[in-house]
Image (cartoon, rainbow, N blue to C red):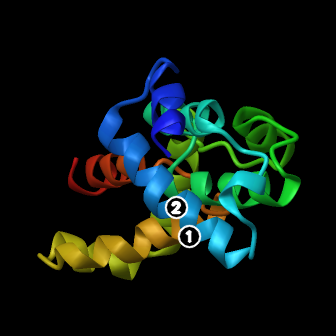
Amino acid sequence: LTPWLDAALEVDGTDASTVANWLTGELLGTCSQADVDVHESGLDGAWIGQLVALIADGTLSNKLAKQVLATGVEDRGERSPQQIASDEGLEQVSDEGELQAIVDQVIADNAGTVEAIRGGNDKAIGALVGQVMKATRGQADPRLTNELLQRAING
């Protein structure tokens, strides 16, 4: 997989450690699960580099990137990671205004959980994050979601 690593690192927004993890962990695991030889997957280092770059720029979360990878293996690399993300509606929701509206609704719908958080139960915020993720079909940027929830609850 060394030539794949070299090709992936030529894509802007990639780093060796992340690319290596995606090649040796996710790609090989996904191919194995799909019972496809990695060399017959239709993917190459540049494809993986593009996928990692989409994670780095916030377009995809790791979870969504795994879905894109699985689809890429299934498609045998016919579409780029960006094309799959766009076609399948898998881009991460990172628009602060859009997420803020969802966060506000989740807070309004979960007053008891909000009070528990204000009362010191910091772990309860996970339930609210889960509600935001549910509302966005798992596409909300988790870091931004946590930040918006913390801001809204704690002022």
Q: Looking at the picture, how far across and down is residue 72, in whole percent?
A: 76, 51
Pick the residue in front: 26 or 149: 26
Pick the residue in front: 33 or 144: 33
The amino acid pointed to by label 2 is Glu
The residue carrying mark 2 is 26
Confirm or deny contact between disc 1 and disc 2 (CB under 8 A).
yes
The residue carrying mark 1 is 29
Identify the residue at horizontal 67%, vertical 66% (top origin): 31
Pick the residue in front: 3 or 145: 3
> Is residue 139 visible to us here?
no
> Is residue 72 visible to us here?
yes
From this view, report whether residue 109 is shown above or below residue 104.
Answer: below
Identify the residue at horizontal 43%, vertical 66% (top origin): 129
Q: Secondary structure at mark 1?
A: helix
Relative horizontal placement of residue 147, taking residue 39 as reference (left or right): left
Identify the residue at horizontal 60%, vertical 59% (top origin): 66
Q: Secondary structure at mark 2?
A: helix
From this view, report whether residue 6 is shown above or below residue 147.
Answer: above
Pick the residue in front: 51 or 85: 51
Relative horizontal placement of residue 35, taking residue 94 as reference (left or right): right
Q: Residues within 10 Å of mark 1 (few under 14, many from 20)?
A: some
Q: Quadrant of residue 111?
A: bottom left
Q: Looking at the picture, how far across and down is residue 37, in whole percent?
A: 71, 64
Relative horizontal placement of residue 38, taking residue 53 as reference (left or right): right
The amino acid pointed to by label 1 is Gly
